[in-house]
Image (spheres, grey):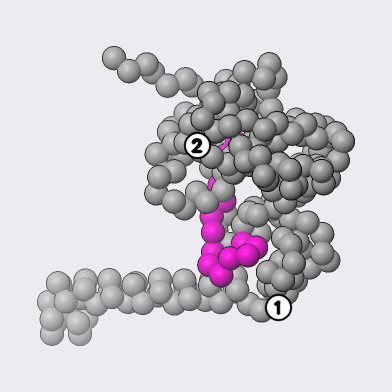
Amino acid sequence: MGELQTGGPEAYIAAQQDALRRAMRERARATGQSLWHPVRLQTLGWYHSRRERICDGQGQVLPWLAYAATAWLEAALKPDWRVLEYGLGSSSLWWAARVQDLTVIEHDPAWVARLGPQLPSHVRLLHIDQSEPRYRDFCRQSGQRWDLISVDGKRRNSVIKRAAEALEPGGLLVFDDSQKVRYAKPLAKLERRGFDLMHFWDAKPLQSYAGKTTILRAPQVEPRQEEPKQ
């Protein structure tokens, strides 16, 4: 009670708040040291990725996602899933090695020419300019439902809204770089519609700072549609 006697309730509260802030800073520092520990980065393949290509500690290709999100997806994926990916990249090779039904949409013709020949024959690669309505609408106009949709290309706010309507009940929506402020609103809307959000803050290949990948699980029943604006 010494603090209360000498400084009054306000000083006591201020001291407790200052102690809490110090504890939070220490926790953030300890977490950062754990995520970026050199041994962990070596095991994950972070150093190797910066020298050659995005890969794990054994040289196997990885997606450009938070490492913790990749580990979660590795355990969750089923080979019979139908997967749609917006944004061609190393992740396309990673998905292709794990599922037999993969469609990839890419807007950049140079990237299609560069990486397209590396894709196995069971992958369907579509070059669609981002200015075309078909780019954002393909996910729900394709005539099928998807078990997983990865949104890591252009026009993400428009795409994620439509992707949410094209998932199987209980399907997954993978959304990278979700720490950016411009993505907060559409993610919050999906949470209100009954999607479960899992946020993965972690180190990422090629980056010297942590990133955030969010994985959303659709409701087991049809998600509630947004009410039309009056």
Q: Residue furthest right?
A: 121
Please tell me whether mark 2 sits on a helix, a strand or a loop. Answer: loop
Q: Residue at x 27, y 71 (%)?
A: 17
Q: Magenta span has 207?
A: yes
Q: Quadrant of residue 185?
A: top left
What residue is pinned by disc 1? 39
Q: Tell me where residue 141 appears, x and y as whole percent.
A: 62, 18
**Where does the C terminus fall, quadrant-wise?**
top left
**Spatial CA span between label 1 and label 2:** 37 Å
Between 110 and 211, the one nearer to me in the picture: 110
Tell me where the magenta segment starts and ends, as one range. 204-221
User: Does residue 195 appear left or right of residue 59 in this picture?
Assistant: left
Residue 124: image location, x then y, percent: 77, 31
How many numbered marks, from 0 up? 2
Q: Secondary structure at mark 1?
A: helix
Residue at x 56% of width, y 48% of height: 176
* Location of residue 4 in the rendering, given as x and y in whole percent from the top left corner: 17, 78
| Residue bearing mark 2 | 155
Whether residue 192 is situated above or below residue 180 in the rendered picture: above
Task: Work out whether mark 1 precedes mark 2 in sequence or the reverse, and give the earlier one.
Answer: 1
207 and 117: which one is in front? 117
Q: Position of residue 113 (x, y in %)?
A: 73, 43
Residue drawn at 62 percent across, 24 percent down? 138
